[in-house]
Image: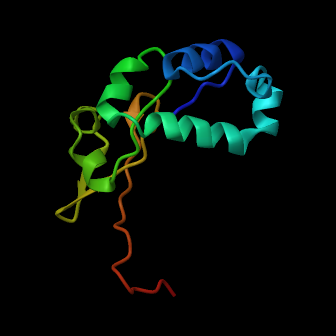
Amino acid sequence: MLAAANDRLFAELARRLELPADERFATNAARVAHREELAALVQERLEREPTAVWLERLVGIPIAPVQTIREAAEHPHTRALGIVQTLDGRERLAEPLRIDGERVRVDTPPPELGQLDR
């Protein structure tokens, strides 16, 4: 996931991706109007290098890899934040929310595969 949500961040992203100067992408309104062209151009650039290279190269720009549930559950940050919770002997990913400084807990398990709640 990549988020360059203002002109300053986008200009820095464009510089690091070596995107050509283009009036279609000069302002947020222009980028929204030409979203498909911009997305294709950014995707083409990102496909040139592995994710790890971009995570290092784009430090300072909001970016994070999209992870599978397993990757998210096994990530050290997820564990450290207490987002992995055990319920009925099974680990699950909890909501990444805190209320009054406490991790939100769910006390009921999800339905079993095929189970209908009637």
Where is 77 relative to 66, above or below? above
In this view, the residue farthest toward the left is: 89
Identify the residue at horizontal 63%, vertical 20% (top origin). 10
Residue 86 in picture, x, y percent from top left:
22, 55
Q: Nearer the viewer, residue 62 or 48?
A: 48
**Residue 98: in sight, yes or no?**
no
Identify the residue at horizontal 24%, vertical 39% (top origin). 75
Residue 113 in picture, x, y percent from top left:
35, 81
Identify the residue at horizontal 66%, vertical 25% (top origin). 5
Q: Nearer the viewer, residue 53 or 88?
A: 53
Task: Answer with left or right where residue 36 lies relative to residue 89.
Answer: right
**Residue 75: in sight, yes or no?**
yes
Q: Nearer the viewer, residue 2 or 113?
A: 2
Residue 34 in picture, x, y percent from top left:
77, 38
Identify the residue at horizontal 79%, vertical 28% (top origin). 24
Residue 25 in picture, x, y percent from top left:
74, 26
Task: Answer with left or right where residue 90 lies relative to residue 59.
Answer: left
Total labels drawn: 0
The image's colouring method is rainbow
Q: Nearer the viewer, residue 25 or 63?
A: 25
Figure quadrant of residue 101: top left
Where is 87 relative to 7, above or below? below
